[in-house]
Amino acid sequence: MAQDYSFDITCNFNKQEFQNAIDQTRREISTRFDFKGVFTEIEIFSNEKLILQTESEHKLNALIDIIESKLVKRNLPLSILDKTKSPEASSGGSVRKEIKLVNSLDSEQTKEIAKVIRQEFPKAKPIIQGDSIRVTSRSKDELQTIMHQIKEKKSDLPLDFINFR
C-alpha cells in the first residue's frame, strides 16, 4: 500500500514579531533627529491594517522605510504590507496612509496557485480548503519541488508551508 504525503499552503506571518517590529519603529522615531517635534502616529487595527500618519509625504516615506527595515531584521517578509493605497490628506495638514496587512489567501489567489500546481505537477493533487490549499502526492521529493516552485512564482505573497506529513 503506497502512502500519500501532504502539506498545506497558507498565507501567514508571526504577529508577535510584527508587533515587536512596530514597537521598535516607534522607539526609533522618538530618538531620530529628523522626527524630533514631528507628529507621527502608527496604529494597528486587529492585525488587519496599519494606519500611518505624519506631517508630510516625505516623512511618511521615511516612516515606511523604517518599518520595512525592522520587518527585515525580524525575518518577516515585506510582502505582508499591501501599500497599494495612496496617501491621503488628513486634518491639520498631515498625511495619512492605510496599509493593509496580508495574512490570508483570497479565493482568486488559491485558485491561481492550485492551477499552477495542476499544470506543472499532474501527479500532485491540490485541494482548496477555504484560505489554504492542501497538496497531496505519493512522493516527498515532488512536494518539496512544489514548495520551491510556488515560493519562486508567488514571491509577492508571504506563503507558509505547514503540516508536512
Image: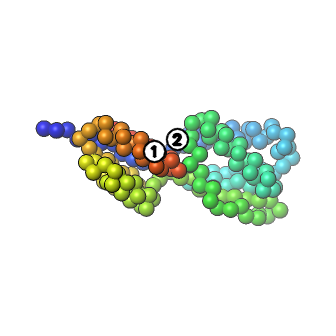
Above or below, 159 relative to 57: above
Q: Position of residue 97 (x, y in %)?
A: 69, 58
> What is the quadrant of the N terminus in the image?
top left
The residue at the far left in this view is 1
Mark 1, secondary structure of its residue: helix
Q: Is residue 154 left or right of residue 55?
A: left
Q: Amino acid at mark 2?
A: Asn
Q: Is residue 53 left or right of residue 139?
A: right
Q: Amino acid at mark 1?
A: Lys
Q: Which residue is mark 1?
A: 151
* Count of numbered badges drawn on the protein: 2
| Front in this rendered view, residue 157 or 50 | 157
Q: CA distance from mark 2 to mark 1?
A: 18 Å
Q: Position of residue 143 (x, y in %)?
A: 33, 41
Q: Residue at x 61, y 38 (%)?
A: 72
Does the image show residue 164? yes
Depth-wise, is mark 2 or mark 1 nearer the camera? 1
Q: Is residue 25 left or right of residue 162?
A: right
Q: Position of residue 6 (x, y in %)?
A: 29, 42
